[in-house]
Image: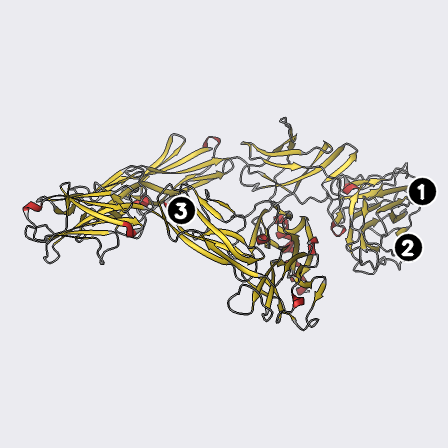
Amino acid sequence: MDGIISVLGVLTLVLEGISCQGVYAPPTVRIVHSGHACNVEEERYSERVYTIREGETLELTCLVTGHPRPQIRWTKTAGSVSDRFQDSSVFNETLHIAKIQRHQGGRYYCKAENGLGSPAIKSMRVDVYYLDEPVVTVHQSIGEAKEQFYYERTVFLRCVANSNPPIRYSWYRGRDVLSQGSDKGVEIYEPFFTQLQGETKILKLKNLRPKDYANYSCIASIRNVCGIADRRVVFRLTNKTAPASIKLLVEDPIVVNPGQTVSLVCISTGGEPAPSLAWTSGSGSLPEKSLMKEGVLTLPAIASEDAGVYSCIASNNVGNPAKKSTTIIVRALKKGRFWITPDPYHNDDNIQIGREVKISCQVEATPPEELQFSWLKNGRALRSSERMVITQTDPDISPGTTNLDIIDLKFTDFGTYTCVAALRGGAIPEISIDVNISSTTVPPNLTVPRGKSPMAVREGETVELECLVSGKPKPIILWSRADKEAPMPDGSMQMESYDGVLRIVNVSREMSGSYRCQTSQYNGFNVKPREAVIELIVHYPPAVEPVWQEVRQGLGRQVSMNCRVLRAHPSRVLRYEWRLGSRLLHAGTFDSRDDTDYIVRSLVREGYGEYTCDVINEVGPGRCTFLVTGKAYPPEFYYDTYSPLWQNRPRVYGYKLQWTQMNPSAVDRIMAYRLGIRQTGQQRWWEQEIPVEGNIQKGELITHNLTELIRPEVYVVRLTPITRFGEGDSSTRVVTYSAPINPPLREFHCSFEEDPVCMFTQDKNDDFDWTRHSAATRDTKYTPNTGPSGDRSGSKQGFFMYIETSRPRKDGDTARLLSPKFNVAPKNPYSITSPPAYCFSFYYHMYGKHIGTLNAFVKQKGQSTSDASPVWSLSGNQGDRWRQAKISIHPTASFQVIFEGIRGPGIEGDIAIDDVTLEEGECPDPPSNPIRGAAAHSVSSIWPLRVMLFFTVIIGQR
């Protein structure tokens, strides 16, 4: 007994948890497919494989259940690491890829989550099928190809194609099939795969014979999967078959000036079949302006970026392609620089009379061998001498350098020296560099002006960091970060300045730190670099959280707000101010804490509004904002309603709208909902209020029937909760008409809780109707000793269907209740062994001394109601309790179930039914009535004949 009590206790806790959860449910997900699939293999080794032909349209839809409505995300595990799925995920129910390509194959995942439980994930592997045109190449058995294939040569014919699935190859000589062993002079290798060439099949012709000179066909087949036809390629092997050879009618290299037009001519000098000619560039692609015709590549108005190696390639699928290359060089001069080197034999950076000084000049020249230098002193040509030594190159320095060594410097050597760089042949402008040597020529020096380090600046302002540079000539100043490896404000690692000033616009806090200024050896002295460091301090107002937060609360309740400081500079002397609108509520300074609170003990209507907390330092404030409101949260539409749509008249339909309320207790009680509805494409909203009695519980499902909707119009529905604060947040959804469809029968269940009673209808040819009632509304004044005191679950508010047998009903009157029509079709039309089975179950209540008979029929297509035979029947008083009946049925065509109640001899004969269910498969219990043994009752159970077709179940109007 203790064990039973423990189990009941656990069960009570579980049921209470379910009750609190209401209709909230974690997501479930299922992938359905449409588009142009060749085949879909369901649950093969726990995976689904969707096969599609390349170029067709892929369409996968993710069907979800769960409440609140789950968010859907499609992602992909690519076939290769480099493959990316449209650079992002897809956030809608349907994944649509038009003209799918082979690289888009792979596993696609649909992930649904709504914050309850774990996300639901399903996947489907997409296999893209394709077959490229095969290519036949011919190779000799010796290392280098000769001009012809002689009789004693062995020849290999290689057939290559890319495909999915793998290829099946066939070889033909003329019309004759070649197979291993069919000809002693022929050997066929098994296919093998290479990453570069794909799947390869080789035909070996040993010691060529006269009959081997013929047409050879390679047929590549993937066995017509996805309707992909076989591919055929033909190669004619003759005694003149030879690899390609070519000749370039151009120099190598070709040196040209910018702006010239260059033509590269390539001609074929041999090859059978005739080879095709193509040009390629070493950079990967030819210039966009290039033109190619019959082996001639023309490059108009050539520029420096067009320079490089160009190759002519000839291919006729015999042997290896022939390739010849030439290099185009575009003349250019750029980047002129100089530097002064004091006497290296003395430890002194200054230029002094009587000592050596070297002037170096460097340019970048193309081609470098055409570069020539000349020197001038004060505008007059300078020749090399014993004291003025001119060298054109220096092996210790990069190419393109000339040096002027002045030995034993004298006063007469002071002056302006000019280095002139030019290319032989002219056409390219010269570069001239002036260097002044005088008594004022001194090495550089760097200093930071007084008061310029550290530099303090407010975030968002412009700052100039300054290093004073002295010396003659003044060198270029290089700026970089001194405290860390980080880019400069322009994104580079180093910035140049000619005046020693680094200007930073719109300074941010990330730019705080040390900056190094350093002399460059170019355009100055070739000495140890001079450098200085400047400290930059960026002041910014406090960063706080939350920046913005919405607080929803009802009247009379407490509201707590907290504003926290994350960082600030300077961080000293922080103060705060709390305000409601412009009204100051509280102010103070921070001590050891880094946050501040404000509490409203009891919220009044005037307390709603925007609260701000300004945390202030000498730079400015950082602000936390709290919007305190009594607005209700939006309702959450329920999308998993069973059979939400019904149709009572040809042009009119109704829709069962259901929703829950998000966080219903967060604010004041919701008194009503404002329902708005409009047709899509129209602007006018029709509105009404739906009153709400009592408090709404979390997870409580609320229902409102939309009626008089015009078929087939689509409607936008808007729902807004109303409290004494006013209107809350709205939710919208779309209601779309579709022909009433029943989900698969394994899901059909009707408990008669809502009109229109799951599309059950009354028979028009009977004597009276079934009635929908609950124990709370049913009048038992005149018939207290018959009928149920609650629905099947025991609830007095729950509904059921029953026949009222009071006057004017008389003995033998009948009432029939007809279900919707169900259509059945096979899951697999090619393997029918027996008709489908369904378990038809319901609960019945037959209490009273005048109980008549309850019959259950299955009426199939083509039958009239009078022709149908009962599959279940029971008569007489069964006691004051609900009982369950289960019957396995095997319909042969579309069908309806019919409940027939027959009135007994008196008024105490009410019969009720509840919880009607149809499920796929045989009933788990034997198809017998649990009270078959009672002698006072008559029971019949009639089984339809088995048939030869399976059918899928849907509700339809026939």
Q: Which residue is tagged 3?
A: 306
Residue 139 placement (x, y as % from top left): 56, 65
Please give left or right for residue 678 compared with residue 284 in the image: right
Q: Are there few (<14), some (14-19), or many (20+) residues within 10 Å of tag 3?
A: some
- Could you tell me the amino acid type at mark 3? Asp
- Which of the marked residues, 2 or 3, is nearer the chain's N terminus? 3
Q: Name the residue nearer the viewer: 170 or 830.
A: 170
Query: Please, what is the three-letter code of the amino acid marked with disc 2?
Result: Ser
Label 2–label 1 contact, CB within 8 A: no
Question: Mark 3 to mark 1: distance in Å?
Answer: 105 Å
**Local secondary structure at mark 2:** strand
- Element assignment for label 3: helix
Picture disc at residue 811:
1
Query: Badge 2 is on which residue?
Result: 940
Image-based side of 154 in relation to 948, left or right = left
Name above or below for residue 210 compared with residue 648.
below
Rounded to the nearest whole Å, what is the CA distance between mark 2 and mark 1? 21 Å
The local secondary structure at tag 1 comes to loop
